[in-house]
């Protein structure tokens, strides 16, 4: 177990620590991560994953992965498998894999108990009528005309709902609580509805499905969850969570406890406690699954794992290390106060992680040919470069060098502006690891485009020579044009070009704020050692940024790299920060 004192404290950790010290739940800690399999997980979900699994790890507890699969209209096995992959990729594993649908029979029998106890009734109001009867924040609701049905009539109707006799939406089962409650969630909420849809886990076995608020708390009780950690939007739902636990009373009802055992589970004694925390929000993103789904379905991105998407699969394909995402949410902290965190903070965590773990390589993404005219035709050398300037344990590598090189086009300026310290006509610059070169001639095509620089190498400035320490203001990188490997390089950036894409005060929607420069594909040249590296391996292209071999499209002999992040935060500079 990780020493709890080594992890930054927060109010939830303090609650758990105090509960254990006081002997609550016999000192046991059980958490769960309960996603609905109706889409891919995003970066906001990672906060809940890290919190739930981190609490269980640090307090020697357990954390279940439970799929909240109570809405078959939106759920798919594809999402189930993607969620499992994402949780494992983030570095966590679950004590048990569960589904809310595992407990459908228990939920049904619990609903029968509520009806028998006079705590639930079958209602024939339509969805629009229910809304009209519900009231407002300032006005109480009105009782449904079906609220006073007898227990016998309710049992009969509910069993017929279960048998599939009625059409979708024709009836609901509602908890009988208080239509005058100041909390609208307690105004006789629906706990079952009719949905004649095939379920991704139970097939066509059920024509009725439980509502989330009802199923969630009972699932927690069945699994022996001690601390049910939810985001703040569920704070107003907590009274309903507690009402269901109180009136179903799974541990105190032998028949229900037996139905849990019959389903192959143990009903652990103790009462779950719901605790709310602020969700994770970042600028320059949208976190709505509905909007992310629309981006995918409308072809505005290349699928859920598009490296510009804020999904975990997108972040992974982009090359964000799982450790950086965990560090980011640890740095953000856990509070009750909603806030928006700058995307640059996440990118900073990525840079911090990759600075120490990514080996260095030479690459040119916008090539301009440079010929060293004072080296003979066919000149070939092999130079030795460190794989990491800060860690000798990374070792050295061989880099080919010849008279024909590629340099970055932006490292030459025919008419230099003030402060430009790279290569200019008649000027000198140091070639990384080679020596000082002077630009003697600029070759242009018929349309005036610069196609080649003809330069001379000062042999006295090469490593080990007497003039190696001669000073010039600029140093640029290069690759050997005769042996470099061609690659497709995708220069990814933020998907949206404004901090709050959801702000519609100007009449625009998030679609209007898609960044037209969020992806640019270039044909680049790389040093040969990058030609057959493994997919998902991450490298620093010196002076350019961090790049990852694409996990889907990269192959030996046909390399494809995605830019993970630039070396510096260009967005902060543009904003004047």
Image (cartoon, rainbow, N blue to C red):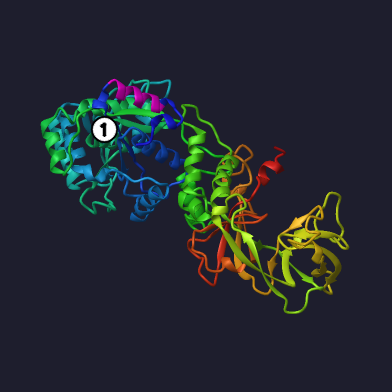
Front-most of 536 and 7?
A: 7
Q: Which quadrant would residue 259 be assigned to in this image? A: top left
Q: In which quadrant of the rendered image does the N terminus lie?
A: top left
Query: Residue 528: image x %, image y %?
Result: 60, 69
* Residue 130 visible: yes
Query: Residue 366: image x %, image y %?
Result: 70, 63
Q: Residue furthest bottom?
A: 377
- Is 534 located above or below residue 418 in the figure? below
Q: In which quadrant of the rendered image does the C terminus lie?
A: top right
Which residue occupies 57% across, 44% down? 352
Which residue occupies 26% across, 50% down? 196
Q: Is residue 139 magenta?
A: no
* Residue 179 visible: no
**Image check: 239 left or right of 392?**
left
Disc 1 secondary structure class: strand
Q: Is residue 20 magenta?
A: yes
Front-most of 295 and 384?
A: 384
Front-most of 361 and 51?
A: 361
**Image check: 8 left or right of 438?**
left
Q: Main secondary structure of the magenta part?
A: helix
Q: Which quadrant would residue 45 be assigned to in this image? A: top left
- Boundaries of the magenta span: 12-22
Query: Residue 164: image x %, image y %?
Result: 20, 48
Front-most of 430 and 104?
A: 430
Q: Residues within 10 Å of mark 1 (few under 14, many from 20)?
A: many
Q: Mark 1 = which residue? A: 174
Query: Residue 406: image x %, image y %?
Result: 72, 67
Badge count:
1
**Image check: 515 left or right of 454?**
left
Which residue occupies 65% across, 54% down? 517
């Amino acid at each position: 177990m990780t020493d709890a004192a080594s992890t930054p404290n927060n109010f939830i950790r303090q609650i758990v620590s105090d509960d254990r010290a006081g002997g609550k739940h016999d000192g046991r800690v059980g958490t769960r991560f309960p996603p609905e399999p109706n889409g891919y997980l995003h970066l906001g979900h990672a906060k809940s994953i890290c919190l739930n699994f981190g609490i269980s790890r640090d307090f020697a507890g357990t954390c279940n992965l439970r799929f909240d699969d109570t809405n078959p209209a939106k759920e798919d096995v594809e999402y189930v498998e993607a969620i499992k992959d994402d949780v494992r990729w983030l570095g966590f594993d679950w004590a048990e894999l569960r589904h809310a649908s595992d407990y459908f029979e228990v939920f049904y029998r619990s609903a029968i108990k509520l009806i028998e106890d006079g705590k639930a009734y079958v209602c024939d109001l339509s969805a629009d009528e229910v809304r009209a009867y519900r009231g407002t924040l300032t006005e109480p609701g009105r009782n449904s005309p079906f609220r006073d049905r007898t227990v016998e009539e309710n049992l009969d109707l509910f069993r017929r709902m279960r048998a599939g006799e009625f059409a979708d939406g024709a009836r609901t089962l509602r908890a009988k609580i208080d239509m005058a409650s100041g909390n609208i969630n307690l105004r006789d909420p629906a706990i079952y509805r009719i949905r004649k849809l095939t379920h991704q886990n139970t097939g066509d076995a059920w024509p009725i499905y439980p509502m989330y608020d009802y199923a969630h708390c009972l699932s927690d009780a069945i699994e022996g969850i001690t601390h049910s950690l939810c985001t703040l939007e569920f704070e107003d739902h907590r009274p309903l969570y507690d009402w269901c636990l109180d009136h179903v009373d799974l541990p105190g009802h032998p028949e229900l406890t037996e139905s849990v055992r019959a389903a192959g589970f143990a009903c652990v004694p103790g009462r779950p406690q719901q605790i709310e925390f602020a969700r994770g929000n970042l600028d320059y993103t949208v976190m709505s699954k509905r909007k992310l789904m629309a981006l995918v379905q409308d072809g505005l991105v290349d699928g859920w794992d598009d490296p510009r998407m804020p999904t975990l699969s997108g972040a992974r394909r982009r090359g964000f290390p799982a450790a950086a995402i965990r560090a980011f949410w640890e740095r953000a902290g856990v509070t009750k106060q909603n806030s928006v965190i700058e995307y640059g903070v996440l990118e900073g965590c990525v840079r911090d992680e990759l600075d120490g773990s990514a080996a260095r390589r030479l690459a040119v993404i916008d090539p301009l040919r440079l010929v060293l005219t004072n080296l003979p035709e066919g000149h070939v050398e092999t130079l030795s470069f460190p794989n990491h300037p800060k860690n000798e344990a990374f070792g050295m590598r061989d880099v080919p060098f010849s008279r024909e090189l590629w340099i970055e086009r932006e490292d030459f300026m025919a008419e230099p502006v003030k402060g430009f310290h790279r290569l200019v006509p008649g000027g000198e610059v140091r070639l990384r690891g080679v020596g000082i070169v002077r630009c003697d001639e600029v070759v242009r095509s018929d349309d005036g485009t610069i196609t080649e620089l003809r330069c001379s190498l000062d042999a006295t400035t090469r490593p080990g020579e007497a003039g190696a320490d001669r000073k010039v203001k600029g140093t640029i990188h290069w690759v050997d044009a005769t042996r470099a490997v061609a690659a497709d390089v995708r220069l990814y950036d933020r998907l949206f070009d404004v901090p709050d894409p959801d702000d519609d005060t100007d009449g625009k929607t998030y679609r209007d704020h898609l960044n037209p420069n969020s992806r640019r594909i270039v044909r680049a040249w790389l040093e040969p050692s990058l030609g057959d590296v493994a997919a998902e391996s991450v490298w620093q292209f010196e002076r350019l940024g961090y790049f990852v071999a694409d996990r889907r499209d990269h192959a030996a002999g046909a390399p494809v790299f995605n830019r993970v992040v630039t070396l510096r935060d260009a967005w902060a500079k543009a904003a004047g920060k």
